[in-house]
Image (spheres, rainbow, N blue to C red):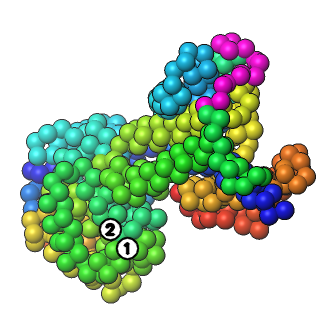
Amino acid sequence: MIELLAQTGLNAVYAASYIALVAVGLVLIFGVMGVINFAHGELFMAGAYTVVALYASRDVPFILAVAAGLVFVGGLGLFMERTMFRPLRDNPLGGLVASIGFLMILQAAAAMGFGVRKEHIPPVTQQVIEFSEKVRLPMARLYVIVAAIVILLALWYFLKRTRFGWALRASAQDPEAAELQGISINQTARIAMFIGAAMAGIAGALTAPLVSVNPHMGHSVIVTAFIVIIVGGVGSLEGAVLASIAYALVHTFVTTFWDGVIADIVGLSLMLLVLIVRPTGLFGSADRA
Amino acid sequence: MLLEMKGVSAGYGRAPAIRDISISVPQGAIITIIGANGAGKTTTLRAMSGMLPLMAGEITFEGKRIDGLPASRVVAHGIAHVPEGRRVFPDMTVEENLRTGAFLRRDRDGIEADLRDVYARFPRLEERRRQRAQTLSGGEQQMLAIGRALMSKPRLLLMDEPSMGLAPVIVEEIARIIEEIHARGLSVVLVEQNAELALELADHAYVLETGNCALQGPARELHDNEHVRAAYLGI
């Protein structure tokens, strides 16, 4: 029993890692630009397909394929900022609707380019860390966990300790006052969009060999990310990380001891419960970011 | 003239909120704009700092045209704007707020020196440097907003209602601070509802009424003007 708990705990940590990467990026974009990016799950998918295109089909080393995913999806983020979110800045629903359109375009592009079948991606490594006979952590999962921790710490350092990090937080908290300090809102929007998209891209790229890659894989990812963000408190990066961990624990344990459908129901019920008890989320305040 | 605003009309939507406003700020002066709620004081200030595009007219600062520039570029020319309602960054610490005021500067030593200078001027901000700005009192937030503006090393300071919502003792303190800043050679444009205070501090005053400049003149003269006394000083 102890071993089953330990194994489930390890699975939960892995799930929390990539959920947190996706959710934190989504919160960052919402905080700085005030836009709910519905295409965020498809950015995750685009990261996964970069690995399909380079690593699975062309024998590019995995690490380079992941780096390419980061750059490519970050670039998609810059494209979205320039062509959709910036022209629609004064229209509160415009960005959201445009991102839903872009989501469909990305799904269609993936289906046209790769077909709707599940992609087979050769494992990056067969190595497994064996804590005991029944408690095992595949190396490929450890990569995801380590990468998530490194990226989240780097983001924390950037936001708290650097000039541009302050600029990003300032424009999330009060865009007008930020402009009065000489901070260009277009520039902070670009930075936030690149970082947020790149985080989704790298999460998709890293997990590609471990999940089922298909053009519609973004859907479950974004639903999970939304639950996590609402539970954590809209606009709170720390809240998103902690809620990712909490959600992954609950979801993984319920999946292991009952099944995945019940786990989804439990996850959504938890979100409803949080909304009833604390409408601003566990770590949210009435203000944004 | 340090700043010259000529025939400016500006506003939100189609109808201008201010019409044909001309204001001159001589080097080293305190200019005040007084008027009732909705007279266009804040609109005038926002037009100066580039927060609002002009519908007509022009603005020059140190001889260079600055109208049409985005607000984030106007700061670089040496104009700092302390907005109405203070607008400090609530979830950032006092020190992060101040350093964000120096966003465009690259002279590290100068920034550190100015930070020490702001702390010397506002010891309460130094005591609270690691506290989040939203935990400060109204008066402290106003000091933080002024300190943040000073961190950009401006030559002209635009202040929008610095006395708003503050207790009389604190208003006195803010007035003293404005005089001190001015004594150090900074020029100031002060927008105030508290006309008594504004006319006491300023050299020259403009009176706005429903978007038009109704009166202007040396602050002392306006203070004795019958219309101003009746309408704004309540005497």
Q: Nearer the viewer, residue B179 or B215?
A: B179
Instruction: State the residue at coordinates (44%, 51%).
Output: A154
CB of mark 2 within 8 Å of CB of mark 1?
yes
The kind of secondary structure element at disc 2 is: helix
In the image, farthest residue toward the bottom: B169
Tell me if mark 2 has few (under 14), some (14-19) or many (20+) residues whose alpha carbon lies within 10 angstroms of its own: many
A5 sits left or right of A169 in the view = right
In the image, farthest residue toward the front: A133
The kind of secondary structure element at disc 1 is: loop
Q: Nearer the viewer, residue A219 or B106?
A: A219
Main secondary structure along the magenta-highlighted residues? loop
* Residue identifier under label 1: B130
Indicate the amino acid at tag 1.
Arg
* Residue identifier under label 2: B95
Q: Nearer the viewer, residue B84 or B204?
A: B84
Relative vertical location of residue B110 with respect to residue A192 in this rendering, above or below: below
- Residue B99 lies in what quarter of the image? bottom left
